[in-house]
Amino acid sequence: MFTTQNAFPKKDTPKFKINNNKIFVLEPLVTYEHVRNEQPIYDFNPKITERVLTETMAQLKKEFAAAGVIIVINSDLSLDEQTTIKNQLVHIQTNVRELLKEWKGRDDYLNDFALIAEKTGCDAIFVPYVQVKVGQGGSWDFVYSGAIYPGTSTTTLRAMLISLNDGKTSWTNASFYRDIPNYTIMTKCTKDLFENIQKVEKSKKEDK
């Protein structure tokens, strides 16, 4: 049994309070590449991608609920609304690496943001990205030392919160684990991603 390791330790920093009224949560872009040369892998196991998307979206819903934030996902929209903003969402998703490098507003996305805001009623968009680097597997020396040697594969979950009004980034974070993604890893990655997000305190009545 191999354990995962978070490369972004918790810090005593002020919690970020999400002040947006409603957030559109984009489905994560998932990419695979070789550890050694960073060449893309296009034919990686599709079941793993499905697993990543399912667990990440499920956990994101829980984390946003804990932060007291109303979210909208693509399946919440009507078919007409989905069709209207399809190209805009694809444009943002396929350029997520570029967006994650840019902390200020981006004029070339403002038209996309404006249409998404109009059709979803949201004032911000949450853009996640899962980067999987595939290397050699781990090993377990159960005969002699009992030591566990981690593999070289890694999973990184990055995300940013972008205002649909002016295209500026209000929050960004990342979490990292040394393994190929699975349900457990994506749950932990998402929880770690929200570590610096302020949660809503439940009243005693709500707990009963």
Image (tube, helix red, strand yellow):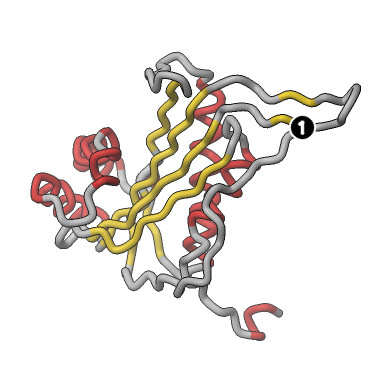
Foreground residue among 131 and 28 = 131
Looking at the image, which residue sits at the far right?
Answer: 143
Vertically, is 162 above or below 200?
above
Q: Which part of the image, by quadrant, shows the C terminus?
A: bottom right
Looking at the image, which residue sits at the far front?
Answer: 145
Q: How many marks?
A: 1
Looking at the image, which residue sits at the far bottom?
Answer: 204
Q: Which residue is mark 1?
A: 148
Q: Residue at x 20, y 35 (%)?
A: 87
Indicate the amino acid at tag 1. Answer: Ile
**Side of 109 relative to 21 (left or right):** left
Q: Residue at x 52, y 66 (%)?
A: 11
**Side of 175 relative to 152 (left or right):** left
Q: Residue at x 43, y 34 (%)?
A: 131
Q: Dot 1, how many residues are within 10 Å of its Cα: few (below 14), some (14-19), or many (20+)?
A: some
Vertically, is 71 above or below 144?
below
**Percent coordinates x, y for residue 204 in the rendering:** 66, 85
